[in-house]
Image: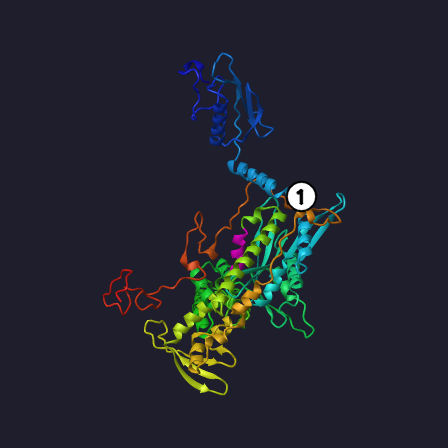
Amino acid sequence: MVDPEVVQHAFGSSWNADMNFAKGLIFANKEAVKRALTIYAAKHNRNIITSRSTKSRLSVKCVDESCIWYVGAVRSLNMVYGWSHLIGVLTVVHPLPWPLMIWDAKQRAIAKIFGDWEESYQRLRKLLLAYLDQEAGTRFWYHTIPRDEFGDTILRYVFWAFAPCIEGFRHCKPVISIDGTHLYGKYRGVLLIAMATDANNKVLPLAFAVVDKESGPSWRWFLECLRNALGDVIADKDICIISDRHKGIQNAIANWPRDDDGRVRVVHRYCLRHVASNFNTHFQDATLKSLALQAGYATQETKFELYMQPIKEAEIEALRKKRRTERQESELDSSIMPYTYLMKEDLQMWTQLYDGGYRYGAMTTNVSECFNGVLKGARGLPIAAMVEFTHSKLVAYFHDRHKGITHDLSNAKVWSTYALGIYGKNMQKSISHQIAAYNNQNGIYQVITAYNINSSGGGHHSHEVNLIARTCRCGKWQNRKIPCSYAIKALQHLGQDATTYIDPCYSLENTIRTYSHPFVVPMSDTLWRDVDGPKWVPDPNLLRGKGRPVASRIRNEMDGVRREPGTRRPDSDLREIQQKQSCGLCHQHGHNRRRCPLSRGASTSGNDPN
């Protein structure tokens, strides 16, 4: 309690920020009381509301109806200018978690801006019909569960794909990356995404779906909808689908319908990041994981064997130690057999060497996870608002990219920046190569690299280039569909323009066609048609409990973070693609300026003396 008689100034405040509220405190006016309450609430993590406010009285209480905390102030009649003193204070220890208060306030704000969460499900149905009415090529499907006692239906799955994206995929690489990401709004769920890439290797979202969870039925339903949406968009090529090793995805693609001639027009490949992550979880060895990654990226059999050999030796050594420590024969322990673990997997599923060129060099689902980051804010919105966000984001993509490609075409460019970047590096490497013609009739040439004492292999490697088959023994040409340095050397030897051998999917002509199907300006929601049938409602079992959900994915070894109790420290050995050390003098990999054979005491500063 504070004695009002200690107040020195008639109309000053006897309260400061370090005090608790107590009966008898004096304030200069009503605004001073409000300011003091605001400071107190922020400092003590208390959520308060005004229960009464008149010219002579101010009362506030806890937002929780079960809490009896309150503060009351009244204007003093014996003060000419002073307004109030506290007439009643009841303090109850009732701490509210501040993050929960912020989370609840955020959800109320989202509902006020984007609409009620439950009503959003009914709005979603009208929204998807509006997109379909304006673009006949747009596709959406849904799966509902009836609730007889309520007369409505629970929306379990919903799929949507916009017509411009479906049409644009016709001019992209026939590679689709699929992935799922969690929603963190009022209702739990998973957003499934199918993603392609254009000629510039930029993401092109094809289709989306909201499901209850990643499971066999949900993935099977999503892939069936995706197959129906794409139809025969790419009639002359097989589509490669890259994903993690989810059993539901494997079973769905394994049961993909066949054509009349018995062919399956889809091939399945694993994301190398997920394969390496599972490998590291099983064996807990960052060095072996790094070798497995390099083996997966290798395009030559000799390099593949080079990276797999240490893994094989580690397994042999582990088995020897096990035999020495155990007197009697026992069953083989798979936890010490990393080489067997990798080799029992179908090599075409996780290696670039045995892929057959279906991946176009794409080894991971990074493009899907990249777009997951773009949608991070939208994943906390009501479902209809999230669909509208995907629409507006794609409209911006199509507008900006079409504008940029038009500019490039006006400057007489033929190939995408991405393709020319790879081609330019390969052409630079081809300068030091030597060539020998072997079979002019079949277009076969031998290309030999120069000696390189700074290279691990010493250089002077021989590669066979077949210009008719468009293959090279290095494996890079047939994998990326862009001439490698050895193919460029052979084509230049014949006086041909090597850029004409770049796959047409990388041409700007194809790129402009990708974004030539424009989006239509959406009509006003007052013009949307009414829907018939039962009302859509969210699954009550997916209602999230109180508290703010985790909105960011917990980083693991796929992000270069080592799992240790109490810490997540970065570890370069765990990263999928490590930057190679490069010398500033000779620009070769494997050493720096200090250890360069050409340095001879040259300066180690950043300035090149030459």
Determine whether 230 is above or below 113 in the image: below
Q: Check residue 67 for magenta coloring.
A: no
Q: Position of residue 57 (x, y in %)?
A: 55, 20
User: Which residue in the protein does label 1 denote?
Assistant: 119
Determine whether 352 is above or below 392 in the image: below
Q: Nearer the viewer, residue 549 or 573?
A: 549
Provide the residue span drawn in magenta.
365-375
Say which amino acid is labelled 1.
Glu
Q: Position of residue 5 (x, y in %)?
A: 43, 13
Q: How many marks?
A: 1
Instruction: Give the left or right position of residue 79, taking residue 539 as reference.
Output: left
Q: Main secondary structure of the magenta part?
A: helix
Q: Position of residue 294 (x, y in %)?
A: 45, 66
Q: Secondary structure under badge 1?
A: helix
Residue at (34% x, 74% y) in the render? 452
Q: Quadrant of the C terminus?
A: bottom left
Few, some or many residues within 10 Å of mark 1 (<14, 14–19, 20+): some
* Residue 540 in which image quadrant: top right
Q: How is the image coloured?
A: rainbow
- Pick out the residue farthest to the left: 601
Q: Check residue 372 for magenta coloring.
A: yes
- Pick out the residue farthest to the top: 78
Determine whether 167 is above or below 11 in the image: below
Residue at (58% x, 49% y) in the render? 183
Instruction: Give the left or right position of residue 276, taking residue 170 as reference.
Output: left
Q: Position of residue 446 (x, y in %)?
A: 43, 82
Residue at (35% x, 75% y) in the render? 458
Q: Is residue 434 visible?
A: yes
Instruction: Give the left or right position of residue 450, taking residue 301 as reference.
Output: left
Q: Is residue 324 visible?
A: no
* Residue 391 in which image quadrant: bottom right
Q: Nearer the viewer, residue 568 or 204?
A: 204
